Image: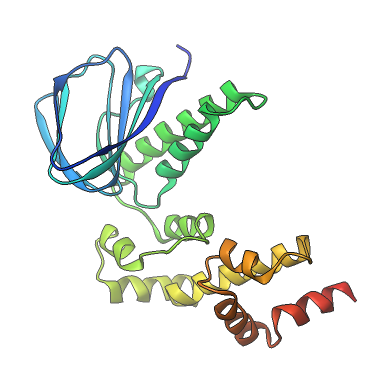
Amino acid sequence: MDIVCKKLVSIYHANSALVSNHVHHTHELVYCISGKGFAQINGKSYSFSSGNYYITRAGTYHSEKDSECTRIIYFYFDAPPELVCEGMFTDYDGSVLSCVKKLKTETDTVEVCKDQMIECLIKTVLIETLRLKESGKPTINSILQYIDENIENDIDFREHARRLNYSYERFRHLFKEHTNMSPHQYLITQRLEKAKFMMKLNPDASLTEISYNCGFSSSSHFTKAFRSKEGMSPSQYIKSKKS
């Protein structure tokens, strides 16, 4: 069987929406971006909130009840049944959401090898899900990967600690043991590394643009962090690379 994206939509449910028991001829992935609710899959009930997703195989009866305003991505696809792991899952490091967002982008483009890229992304989602089922929880390495892929976004380390089933202090200790830096120090370091790469790539880029793309709240915040780490301002750094 070919791996094909049939439909991908993002829907906002105001208040408490109810999707009654139903069935599809394709597999379905439902990802909760925000909000919370309950799902029933083959008679088994699950709760979900932001960062959770569930998968149903073609022919499986399921229903959904949102308990507050929610934003949900519904993704319908064909794939070999043996690759499709049914149930409720937690996207600990954001890798599944990243793939789903890329799928949305691909379905809206006319780029070369579009179908092959979509197939690769769906396979990645299914394999990540199989691994989640096997491991049951994320690792520090998966958190590091998530940070590296989301440098420009706000990172809620306390939420990552919760998903690892650690207190924040325990998570911080393990993180520092693994990287020799606190979570915040690691994030700032990675943002500065990205900034240096951008400045080398395009020395004429504005500091405001670099700040925004690297997750700093302002160019002054970026300059202060850069000077503290590198011992010179971003402008001086650019000049040193030109000479």
Residue nearer the viewer, 20 or 81: 20
- Specify the farthest residue to the front: 14
Q: Residue at x 12, y 44 (%)?
A: 67
Q: Is residue 180 left or right of residue 70?
A: right
x, y percent for residue 191: 57, 68
Q: Pick the residue in front: 14 or 111.
A: 14
Q: Quadrant of residue 112?
A: top right
Is 200 located above or below residue 93 in the figure?
below
Q: Residue at x 13, y 40 (%)?
A: 16
Which quarter shows the N terminus?
top left
User: Residue 170: x percent and y percent?
Assistant: 29, 73
Colour mapping used in the image = rainbow
User: Quarter-wise, where is residue 126 in the image?
Assistant: top left
For residue 100, side relative to residue 23 (left or right): right
Residue 49, how many percent across, how many down? 22, 48
From this view, report whether residue 88 is shown above or below residue 59.
below
| Residue drawn 59% across the image and 61% down it | 213
